[in-house]
Each structure stands twice: as structure tokens, then as C-alpha cells.
Image: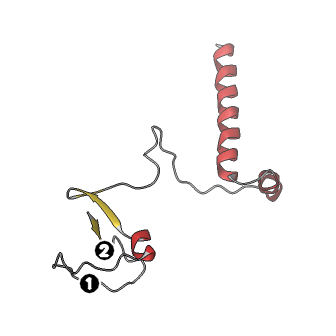
Amino acid sequence: MISMRKENERDIKRPRRIWRDRDDPPELTQEWIDHANVYHGKKLARLGWPPADVRKVSTTLRLSPEVIEHFRAAGPEVQTRIDEELKRLVSRARAAATRRR
């Protein structure tokens, strides 16, 4: 079942038509389909990527301009690549710490 209900206030304002007659369905435009909510029974379906096994923590990090320029010059997904580099550093530091024990 597809509903025209607004999920939150940021949704695009569009006229809401209450539809009750099966012989007079609303017009299904591409815009309507793009903004429609999809339900499985009474439960709103989760669209997009499935939840990750390990969720990332949202934080604010101040980096020097040359670091940002370096990662931006290498292409898109700057945050992902910075995260990968930091994980590599953490892994090396943990390995070095276990060798010192």
C-alpha cells in the first residue's frame, strides 16, 4: 500500500486528497511516486541501505586544510577514506601495543 502521508515537515508540500472510491483512484505521477511512503501491512517500510552491523558515531572533527585538500584531491567519499586511514592507524597502534606486552 502506498500512502501520501507526510513523514515529516521537510517533505515537499503537495495537495492531499482523501481517496475512498476504488473506481476513482488518484493520478499517479512520477513526483507522487518519488515521495510516497511504502507500507508492508501497517508498518512503514525502511527504504535505502539496510542498517550497518557497526554503526558509526557522528562527531565534529577539525582538520588542517592540507589534510582536507589531500583527501579531496583523491576523489569523492572523503569522510570514508579518512575513516579508513584512521582505522588503519588504530590497528597498527593496537598491534604495536600487544607486541610491547
Which secondary structure, mark 2?
loop
Q: Residue furthest bottom?
A: 15
Label 1 Cα crowd, 10 Å radius (few <14 / some 14-19 / many 20+): few
Task: Classify residue 65 as left or right of residue 38.
Answer: right
Q: Amino acid at mark 1?
A: Arg
Task: Classify residue 65 as left or right of residue 62.
Answer: right
Q: Residue furthest left?
A: 21
Q: Residue at x 73, y 55 (%)?
A: 63
Label 2 Cα crowd, 10 Å radius (few <14 / some 14-19 / many 20+): some
Q: For the N terminus, give its image quadrant.
A: bottom left
Front residue of 85/97: it is 85
Q: Residue furthest front?
A: 23
Q: Is residue 18 above or below residue 97?
A: below
**Circle number at residue 55:** none
Instruction: Give how far across and how far down residue 54 sits, in percent.
Output: 47, 39
The residue to which callout 1 is attached is 17
Instruction: Give how far across and how far down residue 94 sits, in percent.
Output: 64, 25
Q: Choose top left, top right, bottom left or bottom right for residue 86.
A: top right
Q: Amino acid at mark 2?
A: Met
The residue to which callout 2 is attached is 4
Q: Residue at x 33, y 86 (%)?
A: 15
Q: Are marks 2 and 1 in contact (CB under 8 Å)?
A: yes
N-terminal of the pair, mark 2 or mark 1, is 2
Question: Is residue 10 at least partly visible in the picture?
Answer: no
Question: Is residue 99 at least partly visible in the picture?
Answer: yes
Which secondary structure, mark 1?
loop
Instruction: Give how far across and how far down residue 44 sits, in percent.
Output: 29, 59
Q: Choose top left, top right, bottom left or bottom right for residue 85.
A: top right
CA separation, marks 2 and 1? 8 Å
Front residue of 78/38: it is 38
Q: For the C terminus, give its image quadrant.
A: top right
Q: Residue at x 26, y 84 (%)?
A: 17
